[in-house]
Image: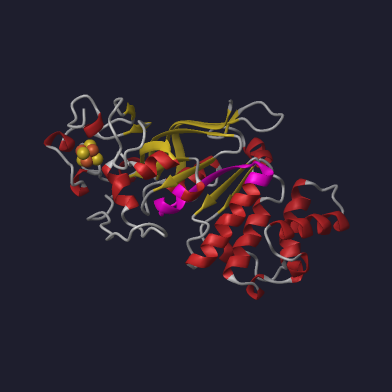
């Protein structure tokens, strides 16, 4: 199947010269139509920068230094969003690709009703839609995300946090996009509301068939919603795998640490171990594997060699920790490369 989005060897930086901060380095992945791909990692690992680069919404001195972001949207020739002119990007953004940013629910215009805010987006991209038509579409969108259409008259401060987040999702779906990028969409919500918004989102995605790029620091959350997962550390993708495979048997020590950093909702209670230390300063990464100062499995060569992201298949017969079948994925760790101990 042709990929809807193909990111190839993407480098994104902030600033120039000696102070350049390399926020994303060599990221590659694809996203198929109707697929949910999750991106996980701690704060500052580059996941939000990756999302902003795809939507061409990098702020300040942020810029794409290299690589491609190939978008194959509806009825249009594929375009490289990294280099396309602003007009081409404007046509794609919102109508093909929409984005719900972190804390977006606090970014709604406080003096405009939901109906006006969502109606304005429809008007900007479909000037032929009259007031009545826009009102009808806004009502449908609100109902779709579980908000009674009559609440369209409400202002943002009159809604609960969960409702505002649902309203943001309605806004993102206003133009029937093929890809919705969600950057930490449930972080500000309590656990119960988080579950409600997630199940609503999954239902909508199954009904409407859009693809999702879901960004979060909570890897255990992604396991429930995503088809495939990228784990990022210090600006690079360190593991790329099917969600269930990653959950059953994370290969990279960092992925293992992330999975033990959050409590499981079901199953046997286990002590949270987490990951010692803090992420490195992206202006001065340690030599070798950037994770080595925090890695319990680090070897001497980890201080010298930087592991590449390479395909790794467990040999036939090698069981995962819970005895499941063999798996394959891409992983950037010397344990899984020719000289590593796991061979
Ligand atoms: Fe740990 Fe070495 Fe693998 Fe890096 S390369 S994750 S330090 S074992």
The answer, for residue 146, to whether it is visible in the render is: yes
The residue drawn where x is 14% and y is 38% is 299
Q: Nearer the viewer, residue 185 or 267?
A: 267
Question: Residue 57's spot in the image, x, y percent?
Answer: 54, 47
Work out which residue is located at the far bottom of the displayed protein and give it.
158
> Residue 76, image x and y in percent?
69, 29
- The quadrant in which the N terminus is found is top right
Q: Nearer the viewer, residue 266 or 295?
A: 266
In the image, is 91 to the left or to the right of 238?
right
Q: Is residue 189 visible?
A: no
- Quadrant of the snapshot with the C terminus: top left
Residue 222 covered by magenta stretch: yes
Quarter-wise, where is residue 232 in the image? top left
The one nearer the camera, 49 or 37, is: 37
Relative horizontal placement of residue 286, taking residue 105 as reference (left or right): left
Is 279 drawn above or below residue 96 in the view shown? below
Looking at the picture, the colour scheme in use is secondary structure
Image height of 98 relative to 269, above or below: above
Q: Position of residue 35 (x, y in %)?
A: 56, 38
Which residue corresponds to the image point at 62% horizontal and 30% vertical from the top-left? 72
Q: How many marks?
A: 0
At horizontal 63% and vertical 59% (from top left) the residue drawn is 168
- Which residues make up the magenta segment? 206-223
Q: Tell which residue pokes out farthest to the left in this image.
A: 300
Picture quadrant where residue 335 is located:
top left
- Residue 57: within the magenta? no
Q: Residue 212: x, y in percent?
A: 56, 44
Residue shown at 32% from the left, 38% from the top:
323
Q: Quadrant of ligand 1?
A: top left
């Amino acid at each position: 199947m042709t990929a809807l989005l193909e990111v190839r060897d993407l480098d994104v930086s902030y600033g120039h010269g000696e102070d350049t901060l390399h926020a994303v380095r060599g990221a590659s992945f694809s996203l198929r139509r109707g697929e949910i791909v999750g991106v996980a990692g701690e704060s500052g690992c580059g996941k939000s920068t990756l999302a902003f680069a795809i939507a061409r919404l990098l702020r300040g001195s942020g810029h794409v230094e290299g690589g491609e972001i190939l978008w194959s949207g509806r009825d249009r020739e594929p375009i490289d969003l990294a280099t396309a002119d602003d007009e081409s990007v404007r046509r794609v953004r919102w109508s093909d690709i929409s984005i719900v940013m972190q804390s977006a629910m606090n970014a709604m215009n406080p003096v405009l009703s939901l109906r006006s805010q969502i109606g304005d987006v429809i008007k900007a991209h479909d000037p032929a839609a009259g007031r009545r038509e826009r009102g009808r579409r806004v009502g449908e969108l609100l109902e779709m995300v579980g908000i009674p259409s009559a609440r369209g008259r409400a202002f943002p401060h009159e809604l609960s946090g969960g409702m505002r987040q649902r309203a943001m999702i309605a806004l993102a779906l206003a133009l029937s996009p093929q890809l919705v990028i969600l950057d930490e969409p449930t972080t500000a919500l309590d656990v119960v509301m988080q579950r409600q918004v997630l199940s609503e989102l999954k239902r909508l995605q199954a009904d409407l068939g859009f693809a999702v790029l879901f960004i979060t620091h909570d890897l255990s959350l992604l396991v429930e919603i995503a088809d495939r997962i990228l784990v990022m550390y210090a600006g690079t993708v360190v593991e790329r795998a099917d969600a269930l495979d990653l959950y059953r048997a994370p290969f990279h020590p960092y992925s293992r640490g992330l999975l033990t950093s959050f409590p499981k909702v079901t199953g046997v209670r286990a002590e949270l171990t987490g990951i010692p230390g803090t992420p490195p300063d992206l202006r001065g990464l340690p030599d070798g594997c950037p994770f080595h100062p925090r890695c319990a499995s680090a070897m001497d060569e980890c201080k010298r060699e930087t592991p590449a992201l390479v395909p790794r298949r467990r040999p036939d017969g090698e069981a995962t920790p819970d005895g499941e079948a063999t798996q394959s994925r891409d992983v950037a760790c010397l344990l899984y490369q020719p000289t590593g101990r796991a061979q």
